[in-house]
Image: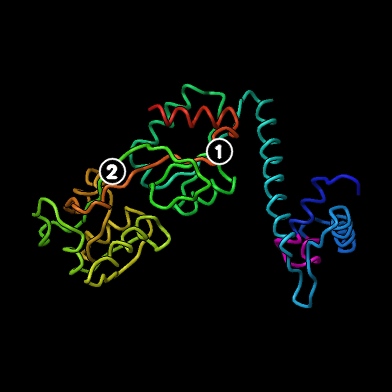
Amino acid sequence: MRDLDTRTARIFLAVAEEGSIAKAAVREHIVASAVSKRLKELEQALDVTLVERSQQGIRLTPAGEAMAHHARQVIRALDLMRVEMSEYGQGIRGVVRVRVSASALSVGLPQQIQEFLKQHQDIRLDLEELETPLIVREVAEGRADVGVCPGLFFDDRLEVFPFADYQLSIVVPEGHALSHEASVYYEQTLMYDHVEQPRTTALAQLVDYAAKQSSLLKTVRIRVRGFDAVCRMIGLGMGVGIVPSFLAEAYGATYGLAFVPLLDSWAKPKICVICHQHETLSPAASAFLQYLKLI
C-alpha cells in the first residue's frame, strides 16, 4: 500500500472504536481477514505498531491513538465536504454546524438566527441544542463549527467571543420567605431544599462550585432536565432553584413564581460564541461567526 486512502482510514477507525477485528468487519461489511490485511499493510506503510492484540481484543498503542484521532478528523472533513458539495448542487452555498445551549436560545439567539438565514438564504444551519460541556467538546474536536453557550468552562484550544450577558436569580414560589427580597446572596438560599438540573450542565457545575465555597451544606431534593421542568417543580413546592432572570416573563405567572436576583459576583455569567480556529472555518461558517460577533 503506497498511499493511505479513506477506505483504510475508515477500517482502522472501526477497529479502534469496536476494539475487535470481527466487529470492525461487520461494521464495514467486509470479512475479518480483509480487515487484518488492511491493518497489517497500514502498519507496514507507516513503519509503526498501531494495535496490540490480546484475548480481550484490540488495544491501541500510543501511535494508534494518534492515528485514530487523525483518521476521525480526515473522515469528518471528507464527509462534510461531500455534504457541502452535494448542497452546492442544490443551490446551497454551505452548511454550518452550530451547537447551542438552552440559555443561549433564551437570550434572543433564535431571532438572530432567523435574521441571518434571511440574509443568507444559500446557507443552511445544522443546529443542535446540547449541554455546555458537550458543546465545548464538539467544537474543540472539530465536530461542530460554532458554539453558543455560557462562558464558564472552556478549552484552551478554543477562540472565545462575548455574545450576551445575563443575570441569575433564585426562583421561589410566591409567598416564600425570600419572595419579597429585592436581592439575596446565594448562601441565604442554602437553608432551603434546591431543585437543580443534571450535574453535567454548566449551570449545575457553577452552582456546585459556589456551594463548596460556603460553610453551609446544599441539599438537592430533585434534579430535572430543562428550565421549564425546574420552574414547574419549584411552583409545586419542591424547593428553590437558580435560573436565568430572563425566564421570569415566561414562567413567573405561569407557575406562580418569584425571581430574586443574586448578588454574588459569579451570578452574572456571559453567553459566548466559540470556535476552534476562525481562519480554518468554511466561508459559510465564517459568515455566521462574523454575524454573531457584529450584532
User: As rendered, which of 67 and 164 lies closer to the eye?
Assistant: 67
Neighbour tally class for label 2: few under 14, some 14-19, many 20 plus, Cα within 10 Å: some
**Position in image of residue 100 (x %, y %):** 45, 44
What amino acid is found at the position of numbered circle 2 in the picture?
Answer: Tyr
- 133 over 36 or under it: above or below: above
**Position in image of residue 199 (x %, y %):** 40, 63
Q: Is residue 242 left or right of residue 64?
A: left
Residue 58 is drawn in which quadrant?
bottom right
Where does label 1 land, which residue?
Answer: 277
Q: Quadrant of the C terminus?
A: top left
Magenta span dominant secondary structure: helix
Residue drawn where x is 22% and y is 52% of the image: 169
What amino acid is found at the position of numbered circle 1 in the picture?
Answer: Gln
**Position in image of residue 149 (x %, y %):** 41, 45
Q: Is residue 110 magenta?
A: no
- 208 over 136 or under it: above or below: below
Q: Is residue 205 left or right of residue 189?
A: right
Residue drawn where x is 56% and y is 28% of the image: 284
User: As rendered, which of 48 and 131 lies closer to the eye?
Assistant: 48
Q: Which label is found at residue 51?
A: none
Q: Which label is found at residue 166?
A: 2
Between circles 2 and 1, the one closer to the viewer is 1
User: As rendered, which of 235 and 5 lies closer to the eye?
Assistant: 5
**Position in image of residue 70 (x %, y %):** 70, 50
Q: Which residues are magenta?
A: 15-26
Residue drawn where x is 44% and y is 41% of the image: 160
